[in-house]
Image (cartoon, grey):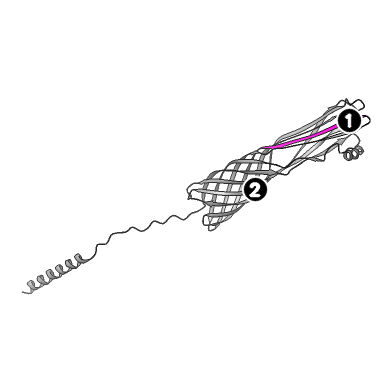
């Protein structure tokens, strides 16, 4: 009798539980929303850039005379200029490769780039003197250019999520071309005097670069930047030598010196590889 009562009770409870379960609403499983990975500046990158370069450097001259006391006369007459050069500007473009490492907000990195420049300088000055004995003319010309420019720079900055403000500086190097000439005619009684002195130097040079910029991560892998750099490749020295039709000519030639420096403003795009 007790066994029958127990079985009846269990059956009743099971039927009641089943009924209650049938009355509960169906629940659909919803997967948790995916969270985008946090951006980090750590990693290697490569990119391209283009911009504007300008320079205010000049070629300066030191003239050699058989009698140094005569230089005051040359200078007073304005026969030869103390310096030549025009402000130059033009296109600059190239590519870069580098690596960044982020620690909190601090970002440290190393970058190398190589640039093509189209911004040469060319200038000349002609001075003509006339007196009872005739006319004499001295023409001084100078030209200079940089074939290519490269840098290897450290970078340090602060990240504000996807924005990076940074300073940069390091080694600058490039190949420079410089040439000058002095052409003098007419300095004698019959106007037959003719003298030409020329010189130049093509050289690979090294110096320094300093600047800064701002960079923004458009996506996890693409960043855009704007940057300013000032470069200085030091001084180039060379001698102007030549001959004239007058064996007693007191003008022996000149030495030339030019500081190779300038400013760059450019924009760039980088492809950032996965962080590791």
Residue 135 numbered tag: 1
SS for callout 2: strand
Camera-side mark, 1 or 2:
1
SS for callout 1: strand
Going from N to C along the chain, the mark reached first, 1 or 2, is: 1
Q: Are marks 1 and 2 in contact (CB under 8 Å)?
A: no
- Frontmost residue, 234 versus 15: 15
| Disc 2: which residue | 229
Q: Is residue 62 above or below residue 24?
A: above
**Magenta span has 160?**
no
Pinpoint residue 121: horizontal percent, then vertical percent: 72, 38
Q: Residue at x 87, y 31 (%)?
A: 136
Q: Quadrant of the N terminus?
A: bottom left
Residue 171 numbered tag: none
Tell me how many marks there are: 2
Task: Give residue 171's quadrant in the image.
Answer: top right
Residue 147 as seen in the image, left or right of residue 130: left
How far apart marks 1 and 2 lie (CA) works out to 48 Å
Using the rendered image of the protein, determine whether residue 64 is visible from the camera's viewpoint.
Answer: yes
| Residue sitting at the far bottom | 2
Q: Is residue 225 above or below residue 138?
A: below
**Magenta span has 132?**
yes
Residue 22 as seen in the image, left or right of residue 244: left
State the predominant SS element of the stretch in magenta: strand
Residue 198 as seen in the image, left or right of residue 41: right
Residue extent of the magenta highlight: 130-147
Pinpoint residue 147: horizontal percent, then vertical percent: 66, 36
């Amino acid at each position: 009798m007790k066994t029958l009562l127990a079985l009846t009770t269990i059956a009743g409870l099971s039927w009641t539980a089943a009924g209650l379960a049938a009355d509960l609403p169906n629940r659909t499983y919803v997967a948790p929303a995916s969270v985008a990975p946090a951006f980090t500046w750590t990693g290697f990158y490569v990119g391209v850039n283009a911009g504007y370069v300008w320079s205010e450097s000049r070629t300066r001259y030191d003239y050699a005379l058989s009698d140094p006391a005569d230089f005051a006369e040359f200078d007073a007459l304005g026969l030869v200029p103390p310096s030549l050069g025009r402000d130059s500007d033009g296109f600059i473009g190239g590519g870069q490769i580098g690596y960044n490492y982020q620690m909190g907000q601090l970002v440290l990195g190393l970058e190398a780039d190589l640039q093509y420049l189209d911004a040469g300088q060319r200038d000349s000055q002609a001075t003509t003197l006339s007196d009872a004995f005739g006319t004499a003319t001295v023409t001084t010309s100078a030209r200079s250019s940089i074939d290519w420019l490269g840098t290897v720079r450290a970078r340090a900055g602060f990240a504000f999520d996807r924005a990076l403000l940074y300073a940069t500086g390091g080694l600058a190097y490039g190949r420079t071309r410089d040439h000058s000439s002095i052409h003098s005619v007419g300095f004698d009684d019959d106007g037959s005097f003719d003298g030409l002195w020329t010189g130049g130097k093509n050289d690979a040079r090294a110096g320094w670069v300093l600047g800064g910029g701002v960079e923004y991560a458009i996506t996890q892998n693409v960043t855009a930047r704007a940057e300013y750099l000032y470069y200085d490749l030091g001084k180039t020295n060379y001698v102007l030598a030549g001959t004239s039709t007058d064996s007693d000519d007191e003008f022996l030639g000149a030495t030339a010196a030019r500081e190779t420096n300038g400013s760059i403003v450019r924009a760039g795009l980088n492809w950032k590889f996965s962080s590791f």
